[in-house]
Image: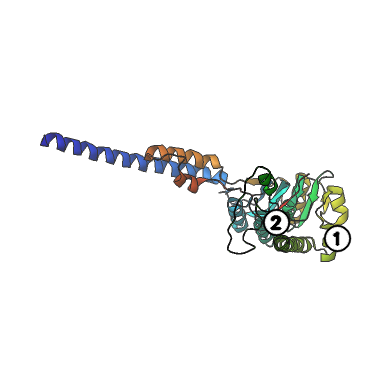
Amino acid sequence: MAFDADLALERLSLRRRLILWRIVAVAMFACGLLAISGRGIWGARGDGRDHLVRLRIDGVVGSDTTDTLALIRRARSNPAVKGMLLDINTPGGAVTGGETLHDAIAEFARQKPVAVSMGSLAASAGYMIAVPAQRLFAHHSTLTGSIGVIMQAPDVSGLLDKVGVRVDQLVSGPMKGQPSAVQPLSPQGREMLQGVIADLYDMFVTMVAQGRHLPREKVLELADGRPYTGSQALSLGLVDQIGGEEEAKEWLIRTLHLSETVDVEDMKPRPSFHLDWMRHLLGSVMGIVAESDRLDGLFRPGGDLDGAVAIWKP
C-alpha cells in the first residue's frame, strides 16, 4: 500500500512538471510569434531608409484608440519617417475617439507634415481628425464637414405605461437619472445635457478654426451639422484641394523634396485575431475556459461607441 501511494505521488509530481513545461513552451512560442510578426504589424522598418507612413481611419471611430495612438507615437519618434499619408473614410463616431486622434495627429504635424486623403466620407469626428493636417485633399463626391455633436437616449416610458409596467428609479440627485430610458427627460435634465453638448461643440469649432486657420465666426456659420461635398468644402475653405491619395503623396514628396520612388509603409494595429488565437491556445493548455470573464477582460478588443458622438447619419 505504501509503495502504491509513493508511486502515485511520484506520477502526480511528474505530471505537474510536464504541465508546467508545456505552459512555458507555449508561452515562449507565443512570444516568438509576436516578435516575428511585430515588425510588419507595427510598421517598424529596420533599414533606416527615409520613407512615408500611411495611416487609414476606416469605419466608425470608437472610444478606444490605444493601438492607433501607439502607431502615431512610434512613427513620430522614428527619424526615418518623414511624413504621413492620412487616409480617412469614416462617418465619424465617438467624440472622445475623435479628440484623442485629433490631438495625436496635431502633435505629429508639429514635427512632420501630414497630408489627408478623404474617401467617400470624412465627416464629423472624421473631419475632426483631419483638420490638424497641413493639406487636406477630397474628391468632388466626398462628404465631409458635418461639424457638430449629438447625444441620443431612448425613452420607452410611454410603451411601459401602455403595458402596465412601472419602474421606480432611485437617484442620489435630480441630474443623476438624466437621461433615462424608463423616465421622460426633465426640463432641468434637458438643459444640463444641452450644456454638455454645447461644451463639446465649442471644442469641435475651436479645433476647426485652429486647424484650418479660419475665423471662429466663419466656422460657426458652417458648423450647423450639415455635410458638404468636396467641391463645396473647397470653396468654403474646409479642404485645400480636389484629389485623392496620389495627389496627397505627390504633395508630400514635393514638400519634403523626396524621391518619387519613396516607400510608403502602412501602419496597422495588431489584429485582434492574434489575441483571440493566443487566448484559446493558452486557455486550453492551462485548463482555463477561453471565454471566461478573466481572459475576456484582458483580451477583448476596444471600439465601443460611448458617450456623445460626432457622426453623420443620412
Residue farthest along the front direction in this orientation: 164
Residue 61 screen position, x and y as percent? 67, 49
Query: Residue type at mark 1?
Result: Glu
Residue 9: quarter of image: top left
- Relative placement, left or right, of 17 versus 154 is left
Residue 213: quarter of image: bottom right
Which of pointers 2 and 1 lies earlier in the amino acid sequence? Answer: 2
Residue 120 screen position, x and y as percent? 77, 43
10 Å crowding of disc 1: few (<14), some (14-19), many (20+): few
Query: What is the C-alpha distance between the residues marked 2 and 1?
Result: 30 Å
Going 34% across and 39% down the picture, which residue do you hit? 22
Label placed on residue 283 = none
Colour scheme of the rendered structure: rainbow
- Between 181 and 280, the one lying in front of the other is 181
Q: Are marks 2 and 1 in contact (CB under 8 Å)?
A: no
Label placed on residue 185 = 2
10 Å crowding of disc 2: few (<14), some (14-19), many (20+): some
Residue farthest along the left direction in this orientation: 2
Going 79% across and 49% down the picture, which residue do you hit? 144
Q: Secondary structure at mark 1?
A: helix
Residue 147 screen position, x and y as percent? 78, 55
State the residue position of label 1. 221
- Relative placement, left or right, of 30 versus 158 is left
* Quarter of the image where the C terminus is located: top right
Query: Residue type at mark 2?
Result: Leu
Relative to 277, does residue 200 appear above or below in the rendering? below
Q: Nearer the viewer, mark 2 or mark 1?
A: 2
In this view of the protein, can residue 139 be seen by the observer? yes
Residue 240 screen position, x and y as percent? 82, 54
- Between 19 and 263, the one lying in front of the other is 19
In this view of the protein, can residue 257 be seen by the observer? no
